[in-house]
Image (cartoon, rainbow, N blue to C red):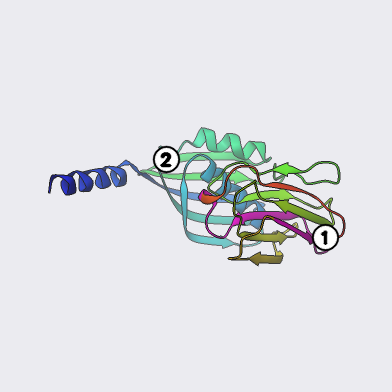
Amino acid sequence: MKLLIWFVIFTLSLVAGDTKTDVSLQVAHGSILSSKIIVQALNTIGQRVNIHRYESDGETIRMEISLSGRKVFDPKYFSEILRDNAMIITAGAMRDKKWTIEIDASSVLWQIPAITSDEGAQMEKSITPAWFVVNQSRALTIEAPYGNKWYPDIAVLDANMNVLSSLRSFKAQERMSFSLPEGAMYLKVANTNGMKLLKEGMWIEHATDGR
């Protein structure tokens, strides 16, 4: 009985430990890419994102989101990550426990690793999918770390974040080579069984005609 009580108290303490924040975002010159960068930036600072409303008139994107995480939302840290991707917070204020933030994304440039004929990239340990620029390659090879099972969950997107091709498999792979479709700009790499099960050391490099 005592064990059950302690388990309940521990579980409640975990739930109580999460901080929640409502945020209204207005993104000038917004795009699918800028929206992706915003969500990734929030994930990087330890915030889970729940999007309640997403509207775009072609010039401005408006988003109503709620954040939850072990740490309090840090707008300064968020701003620094956006700035690294050439996005600027032009206004920000909190009222009635809700943040309202305006962002200029007119010069957005996603700072993620690029796969070229001269340079590959290693995936870092992460709980979220890894992204790469692949517009300088025609084909790629992905290798799983030694002794690790990788269940491919990949997608290739164009410059406007439209999916050109994708694959999601429940069959483990140690190595995979494939050609990129015309117009490929971005590659998303994940693990079908969850990123937490994937060890650090995934290697991605340029290949010749998918071999």
Quadrant of the image occupied by residue 58: bottom right
Q: Is residue 184 above or below residue 84?
A: below
Looking at numbered disc 2 in the image, what kind of residue is underneath it?
Met
103 sits to left or right of 72: right
Residue 17 locus on image (x, y percent): 32, 41
In this figure, which residue is indicated by the disc labeled 2?
94
Which disc, if any, is residue 138?
A: none
Quadrant of the image occupied by residue 168: bottom right
Q: Is mark 2 on a helix, strand or loop?
A: strand
**Badge nearest the viewer, 2 or 1:** 1
* Nearer to us in this view, 66 or 129: 129
68 sits to left or right of 54: left
Density class for disc 1 (Cα within 10 Å; few <14, some 14-19, many ≥20) is some
Residue most extreme to the front:
147
Q: Is mark 1 on a helix, strand or loop?
A: loop
Looking at numbered disc 1 in the image, what kind of residue is underneath it?
Gly
Residue 123 visible in the current orientation:
yes
Which disc, if any, is residue 210?
A: 1
Q: Which residue is drawn at the image coordinates 86% and 46% (left, top)?
A: 117
Q: Give the range drawn in magenta.
A: 175-196
